């Protein structure tokens, strides 16, 4: 049994779901990028896009009655590893403001490109809600 997670007011994605909750309370989120609920970018700044992607993760987890504390895995896909490394302090503060002091397993992957041209970062998440 599974439930598609689609925040109210968001434009429905084409060809994928923003998230799936499965029996056993595992929650799988598609890669979230730094655009708003209207699928529009407010900024090309890496940190601001990362903040928005993290907010999108929290909003989508809420559809499964989950929160950042339930995240067990994050995979970050970035276009420029140096850009990620250069704003570590600012990015760390943004992370703490949105996710808190919860640090799941993480992977960082530099990619040639992302599906959306303006996207600087994409973050994929798995969460588990205890029974």
Image (cartoon, rainbow, N blue to C red):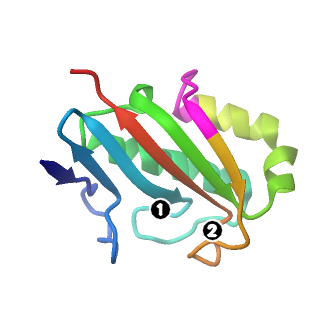
- Up the image or down, 55 lies above or below 17; here it is above
Q: Picture quarter containing residue 9?
A: bottom left
Indicate whether residue 16 is drawn in magenta: no
Q: What residue does disc 1 label?
A: 36
Residue located 33% across and 77% down the image: 14
Residue located 54% across and 42% down the image: 74
Q: Label 2: how many residues lie within 10 Å, few (<14), some (14-19) or many (20+)?
A: many
Q: Taking 124 as reference, is 24 left or right?
A: left
Q: Taking 35 as reference, is 120 left or right?
A: right
Residue 63 drawn at (x, y percent):
25, 44
Q: Picture quarter containing residue 100?
A: top right
Looking at this view, is 14 or 111 the one in front?
A: 111
Task: Give the number of the mark in front: 1 or 2.
Answer: 2
Residue 20 drawn at (x, y percent):
27, 51
Residue located 36% across and 47% down the image: 28
- Up the image or down, 60 lies above or below 10; here it is above
Say what secondary structure mark 1 lies in: loop
Magenta highlight: main SS: loop
Q: Label 1: how many residues lie within 10 Å, few (<14), some (14-19) or many (20+)?
A: some
Looking at this view, is 9 or 104 the one in front?
A: 104
Q: What residue does disc 2 label?
A: 119
Indicate whether residue 102 is drawn in magenta: yes
Q: CA distance from mark 1 to mark 2?
A: 12 Å
Q: Which residues are magenta?
A: 97-106
Residue 30 drawn at (x, y percent):
42, 57
Residue located 49% across and 57% down the image: 32
Looking at this view, is 105 or 57 the one in front?
A: 105
Residue 89 drawn at (x, y percent):
80, 34
Classify the position of the C terminus by image quarter: top left
Say what secondary structure mark 2 lies in: loop
Q: Taking 100 as reference, is 58 left or right?
A: left
Give the mark nearest the N terminus, 1 or 2.
Answer: 1
């Amino acid at each position: 049994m599974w439930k598609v997670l689609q925040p109210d007011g968001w434009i429905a994605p084409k060809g994928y779901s923003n998230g799936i909750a499965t029996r056993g309370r595992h929650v799988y989120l598609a890669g979230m990028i730094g655009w708003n609920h209207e699928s529009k970018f407010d900024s090309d700044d890496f940190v601001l896009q990362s903040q928005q992607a993290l907010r999108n993760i929290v909003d989508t987890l809420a559809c499964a009655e989950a929160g950042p504390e339930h995240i067990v895995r994050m995979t970050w896909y970035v276009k420029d590893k140096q850009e990620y490394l250069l704003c570590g302090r600012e990015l760390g503060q943004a992370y703490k403001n949105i996710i808190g002091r919860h640090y799941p397993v993480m992977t960082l992957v530099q990619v040639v490109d992302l599906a959306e041209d303006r996207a600087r970062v994409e973050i994929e998440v798995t969460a588990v809600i205890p029974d």
